[in-house]
Image (cartoon, helix red, strand yellow):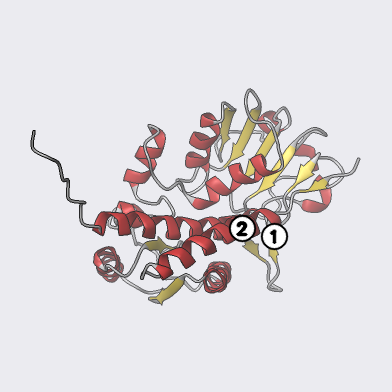
Amino acid sequence: MSTEVLSGKGLAALIQQRAQDEARLLEYEGQRPSLAVVVATDDESTHWYVRSIERAAERAGIGCRILDLGHDATEQVLASVLKDLSAEPTVNGIILQTPLPAGVRTDGLVGLIAPEKDIDGANPLSLGRLAVGQPAFAPATAQAVVELLEHFQVPLAGRNVAVVGRSAVVGKPLSLLLLEKDATVTICHSKSGALERYTRPADVVVVAAGRTGLLTGSHVSPASVVIDVGTNVLPDGSLVGDVDEASVTGVAAALTPVPGGVGSVTTALLLLHTAEAARAQARLLEKPALVSGTAG
């Protein structure tokens, strides 16, 4: 059987156009949306991803500052930078890019990102609000998975979805977003045992474990839709996902490519979130309108 390729490029272009339109309107009103990305690693896949954000932001008319603090940055330095960015009026969105240096606690740092600037849903407050259905920016990668499935009209209500990976960045928030779409969600992780017990019966399989070639053709069924969230850099510099594309192609009904799948949509959503955050912050700065009336 043939496997449909679910490219994210078309959807990413639509989302980026929305971000660009909002950025132009804000700039016309005197405010240019601005994004700050804090990096503290020498991991090449991370720098590849950050460069893609920077290029996309430029195309959308959104300012983008890359703060590369080096792979040996201390937790104190990172905390100071995040506090300053949260208080800086010209910065509308903040991303703390992982991985971080050894010994640095991510959970303590993400709590320093102002919730209104937390465009990638990293602050625990954002995840908590997401869990109870309150307004918050969802982690962009998790949201990108749902946006892609809906774009290609993959049914979710009443369907079984297996999510491989339980990170706070993708697996956990994605499960919440899928539950909101009335899917039945199973989260698989390193202690789940034989992976195929959960992935083969699933209508949709999402792989976000950070392990090259983790999911093979033996893990999926002919009717399954496979979403590959992985981004792994090979020694030759090429980018691959968590799915063994060669063995899954011809078995699964559909598969997202890497690159050109979830990642492109994620980047576009980060820009849209930045523009939306800038709009919300501009409204907060507006002076309340005077209320006039006539005496009776």
As displayed, is residue 129 above or below residue 232?
above
**Does residue 134 show up?**
yes
Q: Could you say where residue 196 lies in the image, as x and y percent from the top left?
A: 71, 33
SS for tag 1?
A: loop
SS for tag 2?
A: helix
Q: Residues within 10 Å of mark 2 (few under 14, many from 20)?
A: many
For the C terminus, which image quadrant? top left
Residue 109: which numbered mark, if any?
none
Is label 1 in contact with label 2 (beta carbons under 8 Å)? yes
* In-image side of 124 versus 249 (left or right): left
Residue drawn at (37%, 60%) of the image: 278
User: Mark 2 belongs to which amino acid?
Assistant: Gly
Q: Residue furthest top?
A: 158
* In-image side of 207 versus 245 (left or right): left
Mark 1 sits on what residue? 260
Instruction: Give 158 or 23, whichever is nearer the viewer.
Output: 23
Q: Residues within 10 Å of mark 1 (few under 14, many from 20)?
A: some
Instruction: Give 293 or 34, whichever is nearer the viewer.
Output: 293
Q: Could you say where residue 221 lies in the image, as x and y percent from the top left?
A: 79, 33
Mark 2 sits on what residue? 263
User: Mark 1 belongs to which amino acid?
Assistant: Gly
* In-image side of 226 versus 265 (left or right): right
In the figure, residue 282 lies in which quadrant?
bottom left
How many discs mark residues in the rendered view?
Answer: 2
Q: Could you say where residue 16 lies in the image, as x and y percent from the top left?
A: 58, 60
As displayed, is residue 154 above or below residue 213?
above
Residue drawn at (17%, 50%) of the image: 290
* In-image side of 194 versus 110 (left or right): right
